Amino acid sequence: MRLLLFGPPGVGKGTQATLLKEEYKIPHISTGDILRQAVAEETELGLEAKKYMDKGELVPDEVMIGLVREVFNSPLCEKGFILDGFPRTVAQAEALDRVFSELSIELDAVIDFQVEENEIITRLSKRLTCRSCKSIFNTLVDSLDQNGSCPNCGGELYQRDDDKPDVVKQRLQVYNQSTMPVREYYQKSGKLVTINGSGDIDKVNKQILDAIQELNKQ
Ligand code: AP5
Ligand code: MG
C-alpha cells in the first residue's frame, strides 16, 4: 500500500497516519517529523530548516526533494509507505513522480483531508505532542494527566513551536498559496480521494479505509 496524506495543517494527517500504519503495517514518513528530529538533534539540516519552520514557511524545495529522495532510496519503503507532508509544491510533486518512475512504483491513493479553517485553528491551539513516542493529543478530546506526561509512554508532552496563533495563520496562508495547486495536480491523476476530516477520529479513519477499498475495486 502506497498512500499519500494531503491537506492543510491540523487536518489530522499525523493522527490518521498512526492508525493506517497499524492497519497496513507500513512506515509513516512525515517530512515534518523528520525535520523536527533534525532540529532537536541540531544537525546541519535541522539548523537550516528551523529558520523556515519557526516562521511557518516552507523549507526550500531542493532541501526537501534531496531528503525525500534519500528516504526512497533506502530499503525503508520497499513494502509500502504512508507519506505525510510531502509534496507541498508542484515542483516537489514532479520530483516525487520522477523518483517513483525510477523505482517503477505508483501511488495507490492520495487522501485529501478537508476541515473548516476555524476548526483547524482551535485544534492546533490545543495540540500536545509526545517528545519521545511522537503520539499526538488534543486537550479538547483527550483526557490527559495533570503532570503532563504521555499516556502511551510517559514521555514529556509539549506544544509545537509552530502552533503559536500567528505562525498557524502563516502556515495556512502558505498552504493556500503554494500547496493547494498540488491538489489539482493529483486530481488529474484520478487517485485523489477527498474525505471529511471533521468529527470522530475513528469515523474519519473508516472513511479512509472505505475509500481505499473502493479504489482497489476499480
Ligand atoms: P508538518 O509537520 O507536516 O505540519 P503540517 O502539515 O502543518 O500539519 P500538522 O502536523 O500541523 O497537522 P496534521 O494534519 O498532522 O494534524 P494532527 O494529526 O497533528 O510540517 C511542519 C513544517 O515543516 C512546515 O510548516 C514546513 O516548515 C516544514 N515542512 C514539512 N514538510 C515540508 C515540505 N514537504 N516542504 C517544505 N517544508 C516542509 O492533528 C492536529 C490536532 O487535531 C491534534 O491535536 C489532534 O489530536 C487533533 N485531531 C486530529 N483528528 C481529529 C479529529 N477527527 N477530531 C478532533 N481533533 C482531531
Ligand atoms: Mg502532522
Image: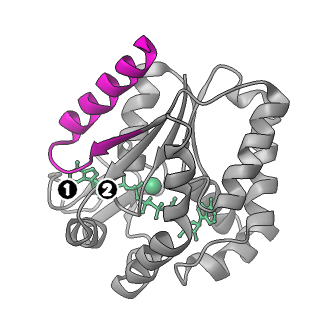
Instruction: Specify the segment rendered in magenta.
Output: 193-218
Look at the picture and state if 74 lies above or below 60: above
Look at the picture and state if 142 lies above or below 55: above
Look at the picture and state if 172 lies above or below 102: below
Image quarter for ligand 1: bottom left
Dominant SS in magenta: helix
In which quadrant is the C terminus drawn? top left
Q: Position of residue 159 (x, y in %)?
A: 38, 70
Do tag 1 and tag 2 residues touch (Cβ < 8 Å)?
A: yes
Q: Residues within 10 Å of mark 1 (few under 14, many from 20)?
A: few
Look at the picture and state if 99 lies above or below 104: below
Q: Residue at x 37, y 32 (%)?
A: 19
In this view, the residue farthest toward the front is 188
Q: Residue at x 77, y 27 (%)?
A: 75
Which residue corresponds to mark 1? 145
In this view, the residue farthest toward the bottom is 166
Q: Is residue 201 magenta?
A: yes
Quadrant of residue 192 in the image?
Answer: top left
Name which residue type carries label 1. Asp
Q: Is residue 194 magenta?
A: yes
What secondary structure is marked by label 1? loop
Image disc number at residue 149: 2
Left or right? Give the position of 168 relative to 92. left
In this orientation, which residue lies closer to the viewer: 199 or 101? 101
Q: Residues within 10 Å of mark 2 (few under 14, many from 20)?
A: some
- Residue 133 in view of the camera: no
